[in-house]
Image (cartoon, coloured by chain):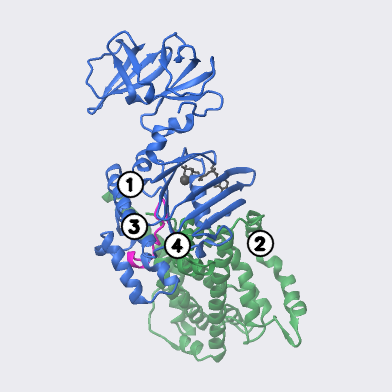
Amino acid sequence: MATIELDKVDKHYGAYHALRDISFDIADGEFVVLVGPSGCGKSTLLRTLAGLEDITGGTIRLGGQRVDNIAAKDRDVAMVFQNYALYPHMTVRENMAFALKLRGDTLPDRNAKVDKAAEMLRLTPYLDRYPKALSGGQRQRVAMGRAMVRSPKAFFFDEPLSNLDAALRVDMRSEIKALHQRLGATSVYVTHDQIEAMTMADRIVVLRDGKVEQIGAPLELYDRPANIFVAGFIGSPAMNKLSVKIDLKSNAARLADGSSFSLPPGTRARDGQDAIYGIRPDHWILSRGDQGAPATVELIEPTGAEILVAAQLAGQRVLCAFRERHALKAGDTIALAVDPATAHVFDKQTEQRISP
Amino acid sequence: MRRSGLASFLLWIGLTLLTLLPVWWMLVVSMRPRVKLYSKSVLIDAVYWDNFLAVLNSATFLRYLWNSMLVATSNAALVCALGLLAAFGLSRYRISGGDNVFFWLITNRMAPPAVFLLPLFLLFTKWFVFGDAMLFDTKIGLILLYCVFNLPFAIWLLKGMLDGIPLELDEAARVDGATTAQVLSNVILPLARPGLAVTFILTWIFAWNEYLFAATLTSSANARTVTTALAEYVSVTGTNWGEMAAMAFLTTLPALIVLGFVQKHIVAGLTFGALKG
Ligand SMILES: Nc1ncnc2c1ncn2[C@@H]1O[C@H](COP(=O)(O)OP(=O)(O)OP(=O)(O)O)[C@@H](O)[C@H]1O
Ligand SMILES: [Mg+2]
């Protein structure tokens, strides 16, 4: 097991700047998830860690030792690929023992390690099968087993669950999490899936266009997104982003129609500043009295646990999620209020958070 | 479904018979004594082995047969080894001008081989001369020459095969601790086996059947191959058709046997891309 330190990592593909000045540290045994929109450089970053891509600037340290100039085979890390990359001409046992064989472990040693990992992953009955005779979930577990048997310094996962169906994905998700808790291995995990990121990560790294947008614990990112991008990216359904003007005299964010919401205490704003007022769908309060901004209901989607209401508010579409079963129908006018403590305010220009 | 099944069955029977007719004719002629050669019947009227015995008792023919075996097999092995390495390079590394190299290799096959006859003769007798030794009339000379002709084809075929092996497998092996040589031997080689089998057979058969260069660039039992032996049977004093047919039959036999053994691989090799799943 080992720490991972990235310092000013840069990666160019010809003229294309794929990773820009990436610096962060991963603690020993930490589970870090990389998220970001497609093409933002998640796989590229993971592959530079594994040694499958060279970097064009900066340094990478693994367990304190500089590795960015070391070939993949000498880094002693393991990688689980999106399509598993099992060797089709080897049995499950041979697949799992391959790395051990390459580094010269004896046969009894290899067998003992493979048997142990297979038992942990419930693969024992399949050890003599070839990958093509396995289901998707079993293949996924073989790929995990292949990584586990070596007790490498770090595990890298590139969207390992994206080829599985939804139900299996949920199972494997908790299985990977359980394995991590058991092995305590430093892990970096790439995913598209919000829920995977939120549930599995010790810390999430949000990437955009090859740059780090924010790093933090899942709830930290959810509760205090550092900028508009992270605010929109973390959380599902996404945060409502209302264009507002700051009115410092009444300490409010004013909408185009004149209605307003209070600013969270401690917001660093100028009078008249253009800003984005962010509210998570489940933070709307359906107001009974005459406080709150008037909105027109457009669409209602009851999901059972909650009611999703799409409404028109001062010319902007907003989404609300109510846990109470309000009797609403399209065309109704409702009054929406907000507890300012749950709101997020961002500068429209810099896109950075200005509320505390 | 039934009817079209039957029709295609009959069609294949017909095509097969048509293909086999010359082979059958060869067998019929080889089983006839000289006097009966020109009879109209297409059936074997008596079992007559003398032609075969004459051929098999000829030390020269056996020598030629041995030469052919050696040349064809060494050539096929060499082509497979070199072709795999070249295809690995072209498939896995971004080589500047790699596509051009590839195209240039293929264009080598576009001119009719006879065009190269005179330059090759001069090269073999005048240029590649080392002391007393020269490439002319040597098995090595033929083996190397056939490599020149077979390699483009082999590289083309094997590159297609290797391009079908997912790059992730190489990468997985590297992360597992494999050197480039180990990636090649533990991952690429086993997965390219069908392609290698096809390459081996087709280049083997090319070398086995080649006549033009073998006839021009060899002059003695030292390096002559069976195809040239066949031509030597056409003589001014009259051709012994029976013995020639027997020899032709014996010449075809190894190719048929080899083909029979690897038929399975050939089919697998020609349907490659079937790796995924
Ligand atoms: N070999 C390459 N040559 C040139 N550009 C590349 C290469 N590999 C990746 N890129 C570019 O680098 C960027 C980042 O790619 P990367 O695969 O890391 O994205 P990603 O975040 O993993 O996306 P996804 O979620 O779709 O997998 C993309 O714009 C891609 O086009
Ligand atoms: Mg990716």
What chain does mark 1 sit on? A
Q: Colour of chain B?
A: green
The three-letter code of the residue at mark 1 reads Leu
x%, y% of residue B270?
Answer: 45, 60
Q: Nearer the viewer, residue A7 or A36?
A: A7
SS assignment at label 4: helix
Question: Residue B261: x and y, percent?
Answer: 40, 73
Amino acid residing under circle 3: Leu
Amino acid type indicated by mark 2? Asn
Q: Which mark is residue A164?
A: 1
Check residue A52 for magenta coloring: no
Upstream in the sequence, badge 4 or badge 2?
A: 2
Relative height, residue B262 to residue A348 (above, below): below
User: What residue sits 36% from the left and 32% below the top?
Assistant: A236
Q: CA distance from mark 1 to mark 3?
A: 47 Å
Q: Tell me how far mark 2 sits from mark 1, CA to CA.
A: 48 Å
Q: Are marks 2 and 3 in contact (CB under 8 Å)?
A: no
Q: Position of residue A108 (x, y in %)?
A: 33, 76
Label 3 marks which chain's residue? B
Residue A285 - label: none
Figure quadrant of residue A84: bottom left
Q: Quickly name the residue at label 3.
A: B10
Secondary structure beneath dot 3 equals helix
Q: Secondary structure at mark 1?
A: loop
The residue beneath circle 2 is: B108
- Quadrant for the C terminus of chain B in the image: bottom left
Mark 4 lies on residue:
B269
Query: Residue A306 or B259: which is nearer the viewer?
Result: A306
